[in-house]
């Protein structure tokens, strides 16, 4: 079950899923589904800082497997066995 989190800054908001993400996990994270103007897809986001989101995901059994920066965006890839 791979998952990625994106944040344009270290304080949030944090993108936590797309339109195909598990609705119960998105609810647990307190995520809101939105469609940004010009995009042809939906995404889930939370206003929490990434560290809060990552702590919540860790409590569900997810583990960070990699992290990188893309421009001013931070990306974490997680896995749940």
Image (cartoon, grey):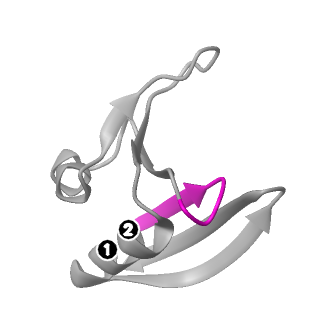
Image quadrant where one finds the C terminus? bottom left
Instruction: Verify whether residue 8 appears in magenta.
Output: yes
* Furthest residue toward front: 11
* Furthest residue toward top: 38
Asked if residue 4 lies left or right of residue 32, the reply is right
For mark 2, does the 10 Å Cα neighbourhood hold few (<14), some (14 to 19), or many (20 or more) residues? some
Front in this rendered view, residue 49 or 70? 49
Q: Is mark 1 on a helix, strand or loop?
A: helix
Q: Say whether marks 1 and 2 touch (CB < 8 Å).
A: yes
Q: Is residue 43 visible?
A: yes
Res 36 label: none
x%, y% of residue 13? 50, 50
x%, y% of residue 1? 36, 68
Indicate which label's residue lies in the foreground, 1 or 2.
2
Residue at the disc numbered 1:
57
For mark 1, does the 10 Å Cα neighbourhood hold few (<14), some (14 to 19), or many (20 or more) residues? many
Q: Where does the magenta region start and end?
A: 1-11
Q: Give the distance between the C-alpha atoms of the residues marked 1 and 2, in whole angstroms.
A: 6 Å
Front in this rendered view, residue 7 or 18? 7
Asked if residue 72 lies left or right of residue 17, the reply is right
Residue at the disc numbered 2:
53
- At x 51%, y 25%, the residue is 41
Q: In which quarter of the image is residue 71?
A: bottom right
- At x 46%, y 64%, the residue is 49
Q: Is residue 53 above or below residue 73?
A: below
Instruction: Verify whether residue 4 appears in magenta.
Output: yes
- At x 55%, y 84%, the residue is 65
- At x 61%, y 66%, the residue is 10
Q: Is residue 81 visible?
A: no
Q: Is mark 2 on a helix, strand or loop?
A: helix
Front in this rendered view, residue 71 or 39? 71
């Amino acid at each position: 079950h791979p998952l990625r989190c994106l944040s344009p800054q270290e304080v949030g908001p944090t993108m936590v899923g797309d339109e195909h993400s598990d609705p119960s996990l998105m609810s647990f994270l307190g995520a809101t589904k939105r469609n940004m103007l010009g995009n042809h897809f939906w995404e889930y986001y939370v206003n929490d800082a990434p560290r809060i989101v990552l702590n919540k995901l860790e409590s569900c059994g997810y583990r960070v497997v990699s992290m990188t920066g893309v421009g001013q965006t931070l990306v974490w890839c997680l896995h749940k066995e």
